């Protein structure tokens, strides 16, 4: 008499290991609705920031230039008092401008990384995933903002050591962080947009070098808008860096500023930059 094969016993999911066993048998529920885009933006931002774990040299080397601006340019012009600053020491006036400058210099060459990812085949793999292009660009833009925020902390520490009268109000410092991240998001998206147009690292490097100093000098980072010639004042009005510096001065020093307008301009600039970079991202992968 032959024995009939026993039927497979059902797996019990009752017990202390039930949750882990469920995850093995049933895939986790995918995010849906409004949670998809923020989750993918955060994932791309984390991936970008993990690169700092392998090479922190960029953060150290980029701290040299703002330190020199504060130590040499700031200290010298504080002594000669050649620029009207509304009654505050020139070094105090300069510090927010150097924070904005260092953040811009980090972000403006961010497109080189996009071109490198294109050459390495990484960008093509990212574009075939379900992740929207806007999420890819936004994640990279805000990763640039976090890098710039680290740089801003270095500048604030140097400025405080030099005796600059900065606020330590937590709410104002949160506002400073938001301003730095928004400004860096715009300039990194500007860089990625240029990368989508020029397509090569050499061309992007040339364009980046051609526009960084004009953007810096055509802002209120070094001197007030009131002493600029009319044509430069008009350029400063459409320069997002001017609004970033104005907001940083108002938050860090308590000087008169236009914070609502500054935040509106920076948010709008970041949104336009993300849109433009997202539209041109696919051109890089062709």
Image (cartoon, grey):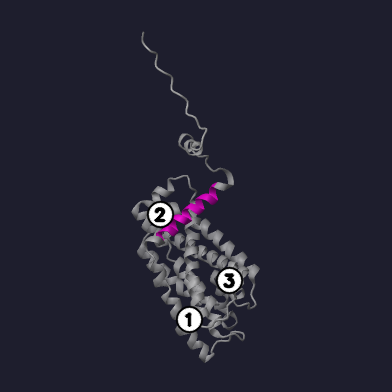
Badge 2 crowding class, 10 Å Cα cut-off, few under 14, some 14 to 19, many 20 or more, is many
- Which of discs 3 and 2 lies nearer the camera? The answer is 3
- Number of dots carrying numbers: 3
Report how far apart the C-alphas of labels 1 and 3 lie in the structure. 21 Å
Q: Nearer the viewer, residue 214 or 67?
A: 67
Residue 12, image x, y percentages: 49, 30
Task: Label 3: state its secondary structure.
Answer: helix
Mark identifier at residue 284 = 2
Badge 1 crowding class, 10 Å Cα cut-off, few under 14, some 14 to 19, many 20 or more, is many
Q: Is residue 40 magenta?
A: yes
Q: Considering only order in the chain, which callout, 2 or 1, is on the residue closer to the N terminus?
A: 1
Q: Nearer the viewer, residue 169 or 40?
A: 169
Mark identifier at residue 228 = none
Tell me the residue that label 3 is attached to. 243
Q: Considering only order in the chain, which callout, 3 or 1, is on the residue closer to the N terminus?
A: 1
Q: Which residues are magenta?
A: 36-51
Q: Residue at x 61, y 66 (%)?
A: 263
Image position of 137 with respect to 148: above or below: above
Q: Residue at x 40, y 13 (%)?
A: 4
Q: Is residue 129 magenta?
A: no
- Left or right, 139 with respect to 118, comes to right
Task: Label 2: state its secondary structure.
Answer: helix
Q: Considering only order in the chain, which callout, 2 or 3, is on the residue closer to the N terminus?
A: 3
Tell me the residue that label 1 is attached to. 70
Image position of 204 with respect to 129: above or below: below
| In contact (CB < 8 Å): disc 3 and disc 2 | no
Q: Nearer the viewer, residue 235 or 224?
A: 224
The quarter in which the N terminus is drawn is top left
- Which of discs 1 and 3 lies nearer the camera? The answer is 1
Q: What main secondary structure does the magenta stretch of the protein show? A: helix
């Amino acid at each position: 008499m032959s024995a009939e094969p026993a039927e497979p016993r059902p797996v019990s999911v009752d017990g202390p290991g039930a949750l882990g066993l469920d995850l093995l048998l049933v895939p986790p529920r995918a995010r849906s609705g409004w949670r998809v885009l923020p989750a993918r933006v955060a994932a791309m931002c984390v991936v970008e920031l993990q690169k700092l774990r392998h090479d922190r040299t960029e953060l150290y080397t980029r701290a040299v230039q703002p330190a020199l601006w504060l130590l040499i340019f700031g200290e010298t012009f504080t002594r000669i008092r050649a620029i009207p600053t509304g009654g505050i020491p020139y070094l105090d006036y300069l510090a927010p401008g150097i924070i904005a400058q260092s953040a811009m210099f980090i972000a403006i060459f961010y497109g080189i990384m996009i071109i490198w990812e294109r050459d390495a085949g990484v960008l093509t793999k990212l574009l075939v995933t379900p992740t929207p292009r806007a999420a890819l660009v936004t994640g990279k833009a805000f990763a640039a903002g976090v890098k710039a925020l680290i740089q801003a902390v270095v500048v604030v520490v140097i400025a405080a050591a030099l005796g600059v009268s900065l606020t330590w109000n937590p709410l104002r410092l949160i506002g400073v962080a938001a301003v730095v991240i928004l400004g860096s998001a715009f300039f990194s998206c500007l860089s990625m947009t240029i990368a989508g147009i020029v397509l090569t690292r050499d061309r992007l490097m040339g364009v980046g070098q051609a526009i960084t100093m004009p953007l810096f000098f055509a802002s209120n980072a070094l001197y007030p808008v009131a002493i600029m010639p009319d044509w430069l004042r008009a350029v400063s009005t459409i320069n997002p860096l001017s609004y970033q510096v104005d907001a940083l001065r108002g938050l860090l020093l308590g000087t008169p500023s236009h914070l609502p307008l500054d935040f509106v301009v920076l948010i709008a600039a970041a949104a336009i930059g993300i849109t433009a970079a997202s539209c041109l991202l696919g051109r890089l992968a062709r």
